[in-house]
Amino acid sequence: MKILRGISKATLIIVACFALVYLSFCLIRQVRITDEPTELHTNYFKILYRGILKEEAAAIASSLESNYASIRTTLEAPLHDTIAVFIHPTQEQFNDATGLLNSTANGTSRGPLAFHLKYETWYNSVFPQDMEKVAVHEFTHCIQLNILIQEALDKAENTNSPGFDKNFEEQFATNYPQWL
């Protein structure tokens, strides 16, 4: 019986130590994150974030910049304006910003020049995603949409007509699955 009590006490102490370390890191993180909306500008991206560390936003910016040329070259993408990257610290804020109800996604493209990320760390996810890879993935969707828009513009007789956007959206919804 003494051995069982000893094992129980040791287990309880170990669990308490892990909880204390985790809570300490959470507290330190809470003090260091920025709650104010913040922008980070690079050559091709405008990153808007809050609720994450500046270093985390910088890592995403660096990953996007280092993959930019190879993705555009490989896909033969047309030139485009700066792409806005919105980073949200919670699923609720991500869902509110994107309009996705009850979503568990951690990234979504919102047109040819914007995408959203729900930033994951071991603080808010049991198995967090590599957010730099998620950002590059979503950027690739923006590039794909830019290519499709350029192809539609090249085929269109009158791109200034008010119906061009509506026709493109209808063709996109018909010809491409939602996950593309």
Image (spheres, rainbow, N blue to C red):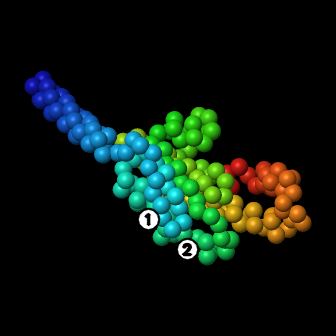
Left or right of 155 on screen, residue 145: left
Label annotation for residue 69: 2
* Neighbourhood count class around disc 2 (C-alpha, 10 Å): few under 14, some 14–19, many 20 upward: few
Left or right of 72 on screen, residue 88: left
Looking at this view, name the residue that lies furthest to the top: 1
- Above or below residue 69? Residue 116 is above
Looking at this view, name the residue that lies furthest to the right: 157
Q: Which residue is mark 1?
A: 62
- On the rendered image, what quadrant is the C terminus found in? bottom right
Residue shown at the point (19%, 37%) measured from the top left: 17
For the residues bearing labels 2 and 1, Cβ distance under 8 angstroms: no
Q: How many marks?
A: 2
**Foreground: 123 or 10?**
123
Residue 169 appears at what percent x and percent y?
Answer: 79, 52
**Foreground: 115 or 74?**
115
- Element type at marker 1? helix
Residue 22 appears at what percent x and percent y?
Answer: 27, 39
Q: Amino acid at mark 2?
A: Ala
Residue 79 appears at what percent x and percent y?
Answer: 65, 70
- Above or below residue 154? Residue 51 is above
Task: Give the CA separation, mark 2 to mark 1.
Answer: 13 Å
State which tag comes first along the sequence, 2 or 1: 1
Residue shown at the point (45%, 57%) measured from the top left: 40
Residue shown at the point (53%, 41%) measured from the top left: 94
